[in-house]
Amino acid sequence: MSTLSPIEQARFNMIEQQIRPWDVLDPTVLELLSAVRREDFVPLAHKALAFMDMEVPLPGGECMLAPRVEARLLQDLKVQPHEKVLEVGGGSGYMAALLAHRAQRVISLELNPELVQMARANLQKAGITNAEVREGDGAKDVSVDGPFDVILLSGSVAEVPKALLAQLKQGGRLAAIVGAEPMMRATFVTRTGEASYTTTQPWDTVAPRLRNFPEPSRFSF
């Protein structure tokens, strides 16, 4: 007989049935997913969806990424305790909370004022003090507080913006989901020198667009 409460059972199932099969095997990441209460970052109306393999709707037409996508991004970024992280697309604050457990400091940018308030309240409730949510547009100016060790785009873009790459420290990593439906790729860019970068695209997924990032013209000749 399971002695877990229904909510702990649901969290356990999410980790074992969605996240592990997606090659998220780093024990520290799995532990973190057990410890940070995802349900506390989900709007009340959608609490029942907290552990589902889907994107959870947020106010303003935004959404939380599917748990397995968040977990895999977190694992593959390999954030270190001394690092400063910029997140673009803060949503409800859940990803910022996960990042904050691994990093020295997290700055999370969110366009929607309602979500900014929600994320701040959620992080405060979770007792997280090293993540700061700012109302701002990650597609425009991110030079405040840069450069960063890690930049995460919590949504998809048509291409990795050069302005964001310029905000990486040498050795810093940027993660984004790049491309157009039906085929997008998790894209990890490491800054290896003043003007040199290496890129890997280890897995495919699909994620909603981040707002205000440029779309390429549909016509190519």
Image: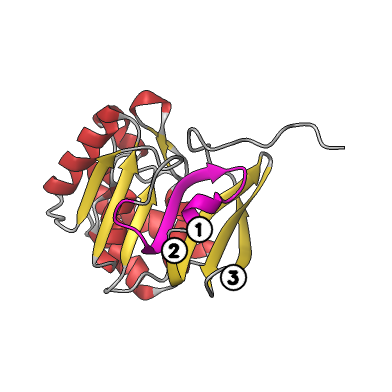
Magenta stretch bounds: 144-164
- In the image, what residue type sits under mark 2? Leu
Q: Amino acid at mark 3?
A: Ser
Instruction: Compare marks 1 and 3 and give the one earlier in the sequence.
Output: 1
Numbered circle sitting on residue 168: 2
Q: Quadrant of the C terminus?
A: top right
Instruction: Name the mark on residue 182.
Output: none
Q: Residues within 10 Å of mark 2 (few under 14, many from 20)?
A: many
Dot placed on the residue nearer the N-terminal end, 2 or 3: 2
Q: Vertical placement of 52 versus 73: above or below?
A: above
State the CA–CA distance, disc 2 to disc 3: 11 Å
- Pointer 1 local density, CA inside 10 Å: few below 14, some 14–19, many at least 20: many
- Residue, disc 1: 165
The N terminus appears in which quarter of the rendering?
Answer: bottom left
At horizontal 33% and vertical 30% (from top left) the residue drawn is 112
Residue 33 at least partly seen: no
- Disc tally is 3
The color scheme shown is secondary structure
Taking the magenta stretch, the answer to whether it contains residue 150 is yes
User: Does the magenta run of residues contain 59?
Assistant: no
What is the x, y in percent for residue 63? 41, 35
Q: Is residue 120 above or below residue 176?
A: above
Residue beneath the point at 28% across and 33% down: 115
Hey, which quadrant is residue 16 in on the image? bottom left
